[in-house]
């Protein structure tokens, strides 16, 4: 019998993407999976439209925008409660290959010490261009870097051990979930899956990237990450990540002085950077981190 998988799709608006994602999942060949859609209080009628188009899909309405971590934790608790062998976090702005889940489960089942696996995720507009193929953590500099913006090398590569896989598409083993725990809800969004993967590895499990499994991500090729809220979460949550994982003092100094402070000063004084957003977000991120304010950013 094939292991049971619960596919968890968290939504906050984007109904067109969600319906397209669910349509792609109807073509998945794997014989034993269910789909759970979690709605973070969308304003575009997501719950009703999903129920109308896909009555076989379970929908849970969270009632508020809980963020990525707390929102997905609702689904992870559901997976544990209902006895699933694996849970798969999947972004609603993705479309999947029909055999992607077969590849992920085969690799995960090949060794009980494998706690989580992730596919090759490519740009929807450029299926040959990799958006994420797992990532590694540079503990000296405090940087978690995905393998990205490379031309895909086909289907011949073997699974590779990595430090983390992105929560855009992440399959986690039940035993790893039980031992490592849920996502840390203090993050709200960004860095939560990276910290989670560190806990999974420290709990005695391995994490692998599975090249043969393919997912398309509808992120723009020229996406920019200079909005204030992005600067806020990326700055605050990287510091929270360092604290949660027990990073050494040298890493903190590198992250704060050589990277964050240099970026902030450049945003303030360099003429060609002054039009960019990010200064306010970074400043509030530092203040909130030292005050112990986590979760959703309550902008004034």
Image: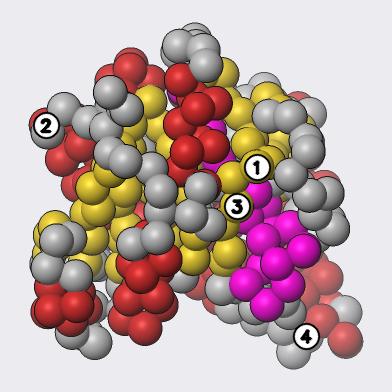
- Front in this rendered view, residue 138 or 88: 88
- Determine contact: label 2, label 4, CB under 8 Å: no
- On screen, residue 130 versus residue 241, left or right, reads right
- Determine contact: label 3, label 4, CB under 8 Å: no
Q: CA distance from mark 1 to mark 4?
A: 43 Å
Residue 159 percent coordinates (x, y): 68, 29
Q: Which residue is mark 4?
A: 274
Q: Say above or below: 26 vs 23.
A: above
Q: Say above or below: 66 vs 13.
A: above
At x 62%, y 72%, the residue is 124
- Front in this rendered view, residue 111 or 26: 26
Q: CA distance from mark 2 to mark 3?
A: 29 Å
Label of residue 214 in the image: 3
At x 33%, y 67%, the residue is 22
Secondary structure at numbered mark 4: loop
Mark nearer the viewer, 2 or 4:
2
Mark nearer the viewer, 2 or 3:
3
Secondary structure at numbered mark 3: strand
Residue range highlighted in magenta: 115-132
Mark nearer the viewer, 3 or 4:
3
At x 37%, y 83%, the residue is 16
Mark nearer the viewer, 1 or 2:
1
Q: How many marks?
A: 4
Q: Which residue is mark 2?
A: 81
First in residue order: circle 3 vs circle 4: 3
Residue count near mark 1 (Cα–Cα under 10 Å), binned few <14, some 14–19, many ≥20: many
- Front in this rendered view, residue 161 or 95: 95
First in residue order: circle 1 vs circle 4: 1
Q: Which residue is mark 1?
A: 212
> Is 18 within the magenta?
no
Q: CA distance from mark 1 to mark 2?
A: 31 Å
């Amino acid at each position: 019998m094939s292991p049971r998988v619960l596919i968890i799709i968290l939504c906050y608006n984007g109904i067109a993407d969600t319906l397209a994602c669910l349509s792609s999942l109807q073509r998945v060949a794997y014989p034993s999976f269910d789909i759970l859609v979690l709605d973070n209080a969308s304003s575009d009628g997501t719950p009703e439209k999903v129920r109308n188009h896909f009555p076989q899909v379970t929908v849970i309405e969270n009632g508020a925008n809980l963020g990525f971590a707390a929102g997905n934790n609702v689904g992870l608790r559901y997976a544990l409660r209902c006895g699933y062998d694996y849970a798969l976090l999947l972004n609603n702005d993705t479309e999947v290959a029909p055999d992607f889940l077969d590849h992920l489960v085969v690799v995960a089942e090949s060794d009980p010490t494998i706690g989580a696996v992730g596919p090759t995720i490519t740009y929807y507009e450029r299926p040959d261009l990799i958006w994420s193929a797992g990532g590694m953590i540079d503990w000296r500099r405090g940087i978690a870097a995905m393998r990205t913006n490379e031309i895909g090398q086909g289907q011949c590569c073997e699974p590779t051990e990595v430090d983390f896989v992105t929560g855009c598409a992440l399959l986690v083993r039940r035993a790893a979930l039980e031992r490592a725990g849920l996502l840390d809800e203090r993050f709200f969004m960004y860095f939560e899956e990276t910290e989670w993967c560190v806990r999974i590895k420290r709990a005695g499990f391995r994490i692998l990237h599975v090249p043969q499994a393919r997912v398309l991500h509808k992120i723009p090729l020229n996406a920019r990450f200079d909005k204030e809220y992005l600067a806020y979460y990326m700055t605050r949550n990287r510091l929270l990540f360092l604290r949660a994982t027990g990073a050494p003092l040298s890493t903190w100094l590198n992250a704060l002085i050589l990277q964050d402070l240099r970026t902030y000063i450049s945003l303030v004084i360099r003429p060609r950077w002054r039009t960019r957003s990010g200064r306010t977000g970074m400043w509030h991120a530092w203040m909130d981190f030292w005050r112990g304010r986590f979760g959703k950013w309550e902008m004034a």
